[in-house]
Each structure stands twice: as C-alpha cells, then as structure tokens.
Image (cartoon, rainbow, N blue to C red):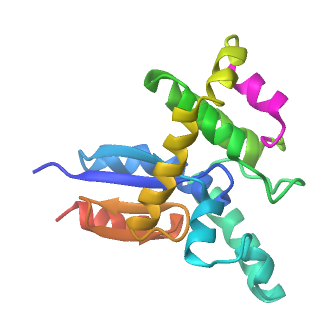
Amino acid sequence: MSHTLEIYWDFASPFAYLGSTQARKVAERHGARLVWRPMLLGGVFKAIGQAEVPLFTWSDAKKKYTWDDMHRWAAYWQVPFQWPSHFPMNSLKAMRAYLALPEDRRDDFRERTFRAAWAEERNITDESVVRELLGADADAVMARTQDPAVKKALIDATDAAVKAGVFGAPTWVVDGKELFWGQDRLALVERELEK
C-alpha cells in the first residue's frame, strides 16, 4: 500500500523552509505521494487563539535555543539559512501568487521563494521581490492574485489546515491520520511511513 505525505506550510515560517528542503527526499525514500498544503500561518494562529508571532512571546533562553537549533538543522541538512532582517514577514502576496500559478510552476516558485526569504535576505513582503521570483509573466500572475477565487482558495486552505488540527508549520500528515509538527519530527514521520 502506498502512503500519502501531506505538508502544511507557509513562506513565513523558518521551520517550514527547513522542512521543505527535505520533504521530497522523505517521500521518495518511502514511495509516498507528496501533497503540498499551503496555508496562511497567521490565519491559523488567529483561529486557534495563538499569538501572531509566537516567537516574540518566548523567553530569551528559548529564543536563543531556537535560533541555534535552526542553524544546527540547516548545517545538518547542508542547506543555506540566514535569519532575515525583515522578520516577521507578511507572506500573503507570495502565498496568493503560489496559488495563482499553474500547478506545473508551483514547485519551482515555492523553492525559490523559500530560499529568497530564508537564505538570501530578500523581503518577500515586497511585491517587487515576488514579481522577480515569478519571472516574465509576473503582471498576469499578480493580477490573478486579486481574483476572488484565488483569495478564497487561500482562505479555504487555511480553514482546512485548522480543521486538520494544524497549529504550526511545517505540519506533516501521514495517510490523512497521523499528524507531526516541526521539521525536527521527520524521523517519526519516516517511521510512520515505514508501517
């Protein structure tokens, strides 16, 4: 029986960026079908009563640990990582742009946008950066981001995440049942995929 691995994500999360760099490898190792589930993390936080930027509510010790841990994960997976000077970031335009793209262009845009935000010190809140990441047809894609259907798709995706029990990013769901939160839970995700 083949498995399905879903990943709930938002460009605004450094943990989602780190997890996203491993998602395809994990799915391929286990012959699982990988499903990318975009959501607006701020919308999830609002729906569940979480602070808009949870990191700002943490003690200095927890902030330092998390900072160090993100860098440890990046080094472990040998992926670039740089804390952006423009944190927290508003990912709304980039997330809508992702949904406005045809399916066959989403993977490339997602990977480049994550890298821009979390490795290249580029401010994806800035529409000019999003346009540059989109390429030649940026005007057409950005026009589609204002389509009520695209806006509703992001709202619906965020609502679906909340209904699935998501409270942070990345959240992994195996076979629509088992939920794991965080890039640091991939060993448990893989164990579930081995069943």
Answer above or below: position of 21 versus 68.
Answer: above
> How many marks can you see?
0
Answer above or below: position of 28 versus 176.
Answer: above
Name the residue located 69 percent from the left edge and 24 percent from the top edge.
Answer: 142
Residue 36 visible in rendering: yes
Quadrant assignment, res 42: bottom right
Give the x, y percent position of residue 31. 23, 45
Prevailing secondary structure of the magenta residues? helix
Q: Tell whether position 117 is magenta.
A: no
Q: On the picture, is 125 further left or further right than 152? A: right
Name the residue located 61 percent from the left edge and 24 percent from the top edge.
Answer: 144
Give the x, y percent position of residue 161. 45, 60
Give the x, y percent position of residue 120. 80, 41
Q: On the picture, is 64 further left or further right than 38? A: right
- In the image, 183 versus 35, the foreground residue is 35
Name the residue located 76 percent from the left edge and 51 percent from the top edge.
Answer: 90
* Residue lying furthest left: 1
Quadrant assignment, res 7: bottom left
The quadrant of the image that shows the C terminus is bottom left
* Residue lying furthest top: 136
Span colored in magenta:
124-135
Q: On the picture, is 62 further left or further right than 24? A: right
Answer above or below: position of 98 versus 3.
Answer: above
Give the x, y percent position of residue 148. 57, 34
* Residue lying furthest right: 85
Q: On the picture, is 121 further left or further right than 110? A: right
Answer above or below: position of 177 versus 89.
Answer: below
Residue 64 visible in rendering: no
